[in-house]
Amino acid sequence: MPLSTTSTKNTIGLFNIFATAQGKPRALEPPKDDCPYETFELIRQRGVARAAGNYQLTSELAKRCRGAIKEDLKERQAAVLAEAAEAGKSIRNARRDYANRKTK
């Protein structure tokens, strides 16, 4: 079953599926700066539901994950803009800096 780009990026970044596919069990630890613990927990639960084959629960958790990730990004962007306002930067430059941070 092919995964969407967002799902693949999150799964690879958070669960390191390549290591688990090779039979090397790893402890699932929340990433340091990527997302809050609540979002990580939702993503973990979605993975468990998908592994169990529970389509309805997987679908519901995927919706909640997308919403939580959007909220996290909004909060992060608001923090960057507030930081820029304190430093006296222009909004355009602050948004550009935020976009550059996000892609790295």
Image (cartoon, helix red, strand yellow):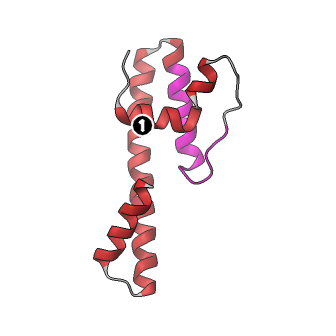
Taking 79 as reference, is 45 left or right?
A: right
Magenta span contains residue 32? yes
Q: Is residue 5 left or right of residue 104?
A: left
Apparent side of residue 15 relative to residue 81 in the rendered image (left or right)? right
Viewer-side residue, 63 vs 6: 6
What x and y, as percent, mark residue 49?
51, 20
Q: Secondary structure at mark 1?
A: helix
Q: Residue placed at 28% from the left, 75% from the top?
A: 92
* Magenta-highlighted residues: 29-49
Outermost residue, top direction? 53
Q: Residue furthest bottom?
A: 88
Q: Could you say where residue 65 lies in the image, as x and y percent from the top left?
A: 44, 38
Give amino acid for label 1. Answer: Arg
Residue depicted at 39% across the width and 65% down the height = 98
Q: Quadrant of the C terminus?
A: bottom left
Residue 64, placed above or below residue 34: above
Residue bearing the label numbered 1: 64
The quarter of the displayed image where residue 64 is located = top left
Q: Residue at x 56, y 37 (%)?
A: 14
